Image (cartoon, coloured by chain):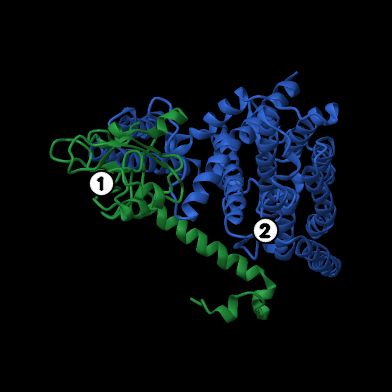
Amino acid sequence: MRTNGKQHGYGAEMNFRERLYVGEVFRGLWITIKHLVRNIFYMKDMPTVQYPEVKPQYSDRFRGRHRLMQRDDGSPRCVACMMCSTACPADCIHITAAEHPDPTIEKFPEKFDIDLLRCVYCGLCEEACPCDAIRMDTGIYEIVADSRDKFFVNKEFLLNDETNGTL
Amino acid sequence: MDLLVTTFLKIVFMLVLVIGLVPVLIWAERKGSAMIQDRIGPNRASVAGIRLGGLVHPIADVMKLLFKEDVRPANVHGFFYALAPFVVFFVALLTYAVIPFGDYLEIGGKRIPLVVADLNVGILYVLAIASLGTYGVVMAGWASNNKYAFLGAMRSTSQMISYEISMGLSIMGLLLIFESLRLTDIVAGQGDLILGFLPKWGVVIQPVGALLFITAIFAETNRTPFDLPEGESELVCGYHVEYSSMKFALFYMAEYANLVIGAALIATLFFGGWNIPWLSRGIIEGNAGTLLPLAMILQALFAGVVALLFFRRSVRERNKFGDARDREPGFLGTVFALMCAGSLAGFALQPWNVGPQAASVFATLLQVGAFVGKVVFFCWLFVWVRWTLPRFRYDQLMNLGWKIMLPIALANLVITAVWVALI
């Protein structure tokens, strides 16, 4: 098998047999029919993933849909420092801060909305977060809804562990 | 009256062959291209869980196209815009009239020639109709009032003119040898053997002509590597860019109908038409007592093996999907098992004691089968080449047509003429 760029790259000189074209046509046909026959008899080796029945396996580090971490009492770990929404290149995190009743914790997010349609899944928010409150480790990649407002998810949704991608 | 009825039946046969092959070809194109490119291809559409490996998709396509809105752009030339797809499709179906799909069928002492119209200028008719096809394309391109459609139409015309010449010249050598323009004579002439073992097919006595003709037919039917009139990468999709709904479907069907014509012409002119090599009609009729049981056994074996494979799969993958699709292997297995049982049940009719009449019909069926088989093979060749070769650049197309194929076709004609004159 020749993969030498000089021989087959742009502007390469073709030899006489190659310029005749006919022989090369049959060589090409031979290659494609080899693929066809192999794929008919070894259908299982095809790299295609039959998606709805079979789900692709992504790495543990895959950045899926966000979630908000909870404290032991179930309240969000987030202190509404705005680091994530500042870091966000897509400007999709909208936080409204409020004073926390506990004086050791300064603030908490009254509202924490993420526009999933704007999100680019870059992961900068979880990098920026100083208290590990936002994570993208859910592995959820099927983010589907039948209207645009449903992609605008709120704090309760992000805190809820049960929501499995369905909006 | 008989003539009317038989002609009508022959037309129906041809139409069923062509229109029936169109969805199969669309399927072959999709599935074949997928397999060639290491993909799986269509396998989702189903009727009650029966998917037939994607063969149901063309039905879904037809349903979609029938119910789609027939968008008509504002500034088209209305009449010609509406007429163009019909012209294209009509012309695509015309050529079948002269293609012989069998020798003759003998029923009740009457011999019915198996060709719709046995014209004595059959080849000229084929060439004339082939060039008519471009009218519909030009009409569509012009009436669409769209620069891409217009460019596609122009390309189609120039391509048609360039390749028609080499196509006509590449057949001329064949005509010199068989000394007839009648397609039935040409096919009958290809039934002989050269030196007692080589079938006298067009491809054997005119290999260069065959290659040129196949190339030119690819160009005439606007298939890759000559599909510049469509050229979706530069012309969106060429002449039918403004068409939607069933009008688009007519263009789409005409493309595949043209493809079947191309395949039928290649098979008729250069690959012996309905002739089965080494099995002439006399041999088949003489040995029908052996051949018929043999064919039935082969069919039973094939159907039986396929049925067993399907049944094995239905047991192994009983709950693969968890819906109606799980029933499919069992259903297909039953169909093939019934086929197998049918062939075996046929032995009750004592096929080894076949009479002369039935032997004649059997020979005809075999020949028609051979023709259909060849047509299907060449249709597959069209698909196969499409997913192998990239599209030519426009100057390469013209170079190939005028500077390479035309001189070769002329040289081939001259050499053949000298050869025929000397012998």
Q: Which chain is blue?
A: B
The image's mark for residue B391 is 2
Which image quadrant: the C terminus of chain B? bottom right
Q: Quadrant of the N terminus of chain B?
A: top right
Whether marks 1 and 2 lie on the same chain: no
Residue A85, compared with residue B340, is above or below; it is: below
User: In the rendered view, does A150 fall on the left or right side of A104?
Assistant: right
Give the camera-side residue of B415 and B26.
Answer: B26
Furthest toward the front, the residue is A103
Q: Amino acid at mark 1?
A: Ala
In this structure image, what is the colour of chain A? green
Left or right of B182 in this view: A145: left
Res B360 visible: no
Badge 1: chain ID? A
- Seen from the viewer's position, the closer of residues B247 and B86 is B247
Image x and y of residue A100, in percent: 23, 36
How packed mark 2 is, by other alpha carbons closer than 10 Å (few <14, some 14-19, many 20 or more), is: some
Residue denoted by label 1: A133
